[in-house]
Amino acid sequence: MSRAKDTIARLLTLLRHIPRAPGYIATTTLLEKLRDRGFSVDMRTVQRDLNRLSSMFSLMCDERVTPYRWSFTKDASLDLRDIDPSAALALYLAEGHLTSLLPQSVLDLLAPQFRRARDYLDGLEENGLADWARRVRTKPNGKALQPAQVDSAVWQAVSMALLERQCLKVSYLSRSKETLKELVIHPAGFVSRHSISYLIATVEGYDDPRQFALHRIQYAECLDTPAKEHATFDIDEFLSNGFNNPTPVTEVELVADVSPSIAWLLSETPLSAEQRLEALPDSDWYRLHAKVPDDQETLWWVFGLGENIVVYAPIQMRNSIIEKGHHMLSRYSPTMATSRYSL
């Protein structure tokens, strides 16, 4: 590689590793990143490159600490490439989908890219993609809860600790005890589930992975201590063996009669890979056989169908539905309705 090309590649590599404020990266870390990618440089070269880039881009340097910390300003555009129509439309649609899934602090980090895509599409006049964007919307299936709010500083610290494999010091609000706990944890993975995001980590002194809801982390600090390697950790195995469940989740065969509308829905969007629908004689209903997880989500799905399903197996699920149905019916007694909420 020629000297000029090597310099350009090095400068671009630096730019790609500098986060937007309030995130930051130390000069020493940037030096390590460059060396990891094969650049033979010293600290003086990195400092000179950063000073040169700060005169051309919206870079900030925090000189109050040593080594210095660098970041882009909050409103800086970090994408150095020209956006194309297809990518702009994809970002436009992704924004509508992610709004109901990600906390606002995370959406704020993506705001410049979303705004850039909208501005690009708005500037197109006769382009079909721009017209399509005005006609397309994303709407989640079922009732979507508002995303739990996550502090932006917490998100920055968590994401940095996870990606850089560093320990994390947190102040965590325990849901069971309703108290704040000061913990040092070793990040192992990350799970986004509906409107709540979870950090999977082990607590200092323990080996069992646990889940920490991001919105319950009141304070987070990325430490300089390397996190403990989780050589045997498998996130898929973790999800199938008790995520948000007191015991490991097993699969069972769901046997139920379903109404014509539900049978039609399941014929187009199956409940599982192993599913069978059989027409019932002298009826427009269908007999459903499906392999499903024996967990709360399956039970909630069944309850959501109401009078459109009759469950026969597994017997534990059937008994649970009957018990909860009786309990729910008792809540709707006429005396309760008139005495508690009289108009």
Image (cartoon, rainbow, N blue to C red):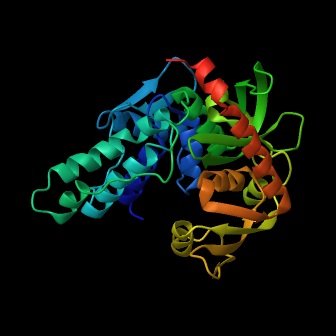
Q: Position of residue 221 (x, y in %)?
A: 65, 27
* Number of residue marks: 0
Please state which of residues 300 and 320 is positioned toward the viewer in this rendering.
Answer: 320
**What residue do we see at 28% from left, 50% from top?**
117
Q: Residue furthest left?
A: 126
Q: In the rendered view, does 311 fall on the left or right side of 125? A: right
Q: In the rendered view, does 247 fall on the left or right side of 49? A: right
Please state which of residues 335 and 227 is positioned toward the viewer in this rendering.
Answer: 335
Please state which of residues 133 and 154 is positioned toward the viewer in this rendering.
Answer: 133
Q: Residue 255, located in which quarter of the rendered image?
A: bottom right
Please state which of residues 122 and 59 is positioned toward the viewer in this rendering.
Answer: 122
Q: Position of residue 247 (x, y in %)?
A: 86, 50
On the question of residue 231 being in view, the answer is no
**What residue do we see at 18% from left, 59% from top?**
131
Q: Is residue 311 above or below residue 201?
A: below
Q: Is residue 303 above or below residue 111?
A: below
Q: Is residue 133 above or below residue 45?
A: below
Q: Is residue 338 above or below residue 110?
A: above
**What residue do we see at 25% from left, 47% from top?**
118
